[in-house]
Structure formats: C-alpha cells, structure tokens
C-alpha cells in the first residue's frame, strides 16, 4: 500500500539552528501538507502546498518556516532558526484533492512523523 | 476559535462493549467530517468519513452519526476491541482537527 515517508524520524538540534524535515508523499497525490503536534496537545495545521506554491497556511507558519518541493518527489519543511517551542512531532500528509472547496471527503495520508527536539 | 472540539480527552471501555466518541463543530459550512485513529509513534490514519448531507455512515464495527442541527457528530465502535486503543481525532474537511480522545479498551 502506498505510504508517505518522512525523514529523519528524530532530530535533536540546538536552539537557533536550521532544520530541514523531509517527506516523500504518495506519488500520484497533488496536495501536500505539514502538521505538527506538540507533546500532549492537538494536531495543528501548518501549511498546504499545491502546484509548487503555498495554498494555505496557519498563524503558526510564520517567517521562520518555509516549504519546498525541490524535485518531483520530495516535500520539505525548513525551520530557519529553531526555538524551544518548535519541539514537536511534525507530520507530513498528502492527498489526491484539496481540503478546501472540494466536494469529496479529502482523506489525508500521513507519514509516521519526525520528532524534533530543540535544546 | 477552535472550530472542531472533542471535549472528552479520554474514554475507557470494556472489551466487547460500545465506545462512543464525540465531536462538536462550529462552522456549518463544513461539508465532510472525518475520523482518524493514531497509535503512538505513528501518524494519524483515516478511519471513516461522513458527508454533511447524511446522518449516518457505517463501515464494519465503526459507525459515524451526524446531527447537523446540533453541530455534533459521534463515532461508535461496537464491539470494542483492545486493538482499538488509540487516540481518535475528529476532523473537518478543511483540515481542522479536534484535540483527540484517547480510547482505552480493557480486555
């Protein structure tokens, strides 16, 4: 069964360092997402991406965050200068259709997540 | 403004009994609702969905009920099994997730 793969599974970094989290979405999916879950808290939407540009982003997704699809398979989340409060599980997801404005149940397929620990 | 809410952080039921997980929403424009299940150290996985034009959708042991007038939906699992123990997230079609409910099914 197709799956979304994420690397690394766990990254420890010092505050202020740049981090890149990588994701390989399902090959025929067109929409890509990043979510995060701080320990013990809810799953929060960060950003959605389609056709090589951001289609929607949340208030959390500020200037220190960026996303990129550098080639035909990878989808990356970059955090420029990490802060302690960026420590969380980051989940990548992909879907065949868009979340907003679609007439179908837009099912997201999630990766297993990347745990980021900022010291 | 939290558009999707799951007010019960945890639920414990006996194996074989029914589990009922609840979810409330505020935005009447949501056209689909989805339930995801999440095991530790894994990403959420899709479980079942319901269109806003329906009031019930059933898939095996899982049934989701939608009450549009009350802006409420619920997931019923019957009979519950120990393997159902996980965190269950209610989500709206706009990608907004609830806080999750941790279900524990005791043997």
Image (cartoon, coloured by chain):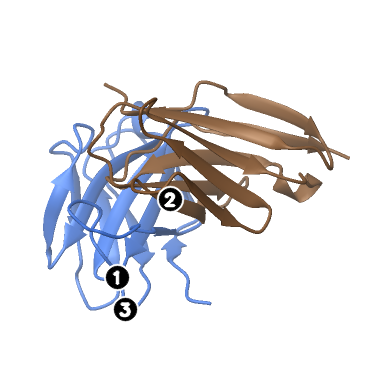
Q: Secondary structure at mark 2?
A: strand
Question: Residue drawn 47% across and 70% down?
Answer: A3
Q: Secondary structure at mark 1?
A: loop
Which chain is painted in blue?
A: A
Q: Nearer the viewer, mark 3 or mark 1?
A: 3
Q: For chain B, what colour was chosen?
A: brown
Question: Residue drawn 71% across and 42% down?
Answer: B85
Q: Quadrant of residue A51?
A: bottom left
Q: Which mark is residue A74?
A: 1
Q: Are marks 1 and 2 on the same chain?
A: no
Q: Residue furthest right?
A: B107
Task: Mark 2: give few (<14), some (14-19) or many (20+) Cα within 10 Å.
Answer: many
Q: Secondary structure at mark 3?
A: loop
In front of the other: B93 or A92:
B93
- Mark 1–mark 2 Cα distance, whole angstroms, equals 31 Å
* Residue underneath mark 3: A28
At which x and y percent is residue A22? 35, 61
At which x and y percent is residue B66? 45, 39
Q: Quadrant of residue B107?
A: top right
In front of the other: B63 or A109:
B63
Question: Residue drawn 24% across and 70% down?
Answer: A30
At which x and y percent is residue A23? 36, 63
Q: Are marks 3 and 1 on the same chain?
A: yes
- Mark 3–mark 2 Cα distance, whole angstroms, equals 24 Å
In this rendering, position of residue B40 left or right of residue B97: right
Task: Mark 3: give few (<14), some (14-19) or many (20+) Cα within 10 Å.
Answer: few
Question: Residue drawn 31% across and 50% down?
Answer: A34
If you read the primary sequence from the N terminus, does the residue marked by circle 3 or circle 1 appear first?
3
* Residue underneath mark 2: B50
């Amino acid at each position: 069964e197709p799956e979304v793969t994420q690397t690394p599974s766990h990254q420890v970094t010092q505050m202020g360092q740049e981090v890149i989290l990588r994701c390989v979405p399902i090959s025929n999916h067109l929409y890509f997402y990043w979510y995060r879950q701080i320990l013990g808290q809810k799953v929060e939407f960060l950003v959605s991406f389609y056709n090589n540009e951001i289609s929607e982003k949340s208030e959390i997704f500020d200037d220190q965050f960026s996303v990129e699809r550098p080639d035909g398979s990878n989808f990356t989340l970059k955090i420029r200068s990490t802060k302690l409060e960026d420590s969380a599980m980051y989940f990548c997801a992909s879907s065949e259709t868009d979340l907003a404005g679609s007439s179908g149940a837009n099912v997201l397929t999630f990766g297993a997540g990347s745990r980021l620990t900022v010291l | 403004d939290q558009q999707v809410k799951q007010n019960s952080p945890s639920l414990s039921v006996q194996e074989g009994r029914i589990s009922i997980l609840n979810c409330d929403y505020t935005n009447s424009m949501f056209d689909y609702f989805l339930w995801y299940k999440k095991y530790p150290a894994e990403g959420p996985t899709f479980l079942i969905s319901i269109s806003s034009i329906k009031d019930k959708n059933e898939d095996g042991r899982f049934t989701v009920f939608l009450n549009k007038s009350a802006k409420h939906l619920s997931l019923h699992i019957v009979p519950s099994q120990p393997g159902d123990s996980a965190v269950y997230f209610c989500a709206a079609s706009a990608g907004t997730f609830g806080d999750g409910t941790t279900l524990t099914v005791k043997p």
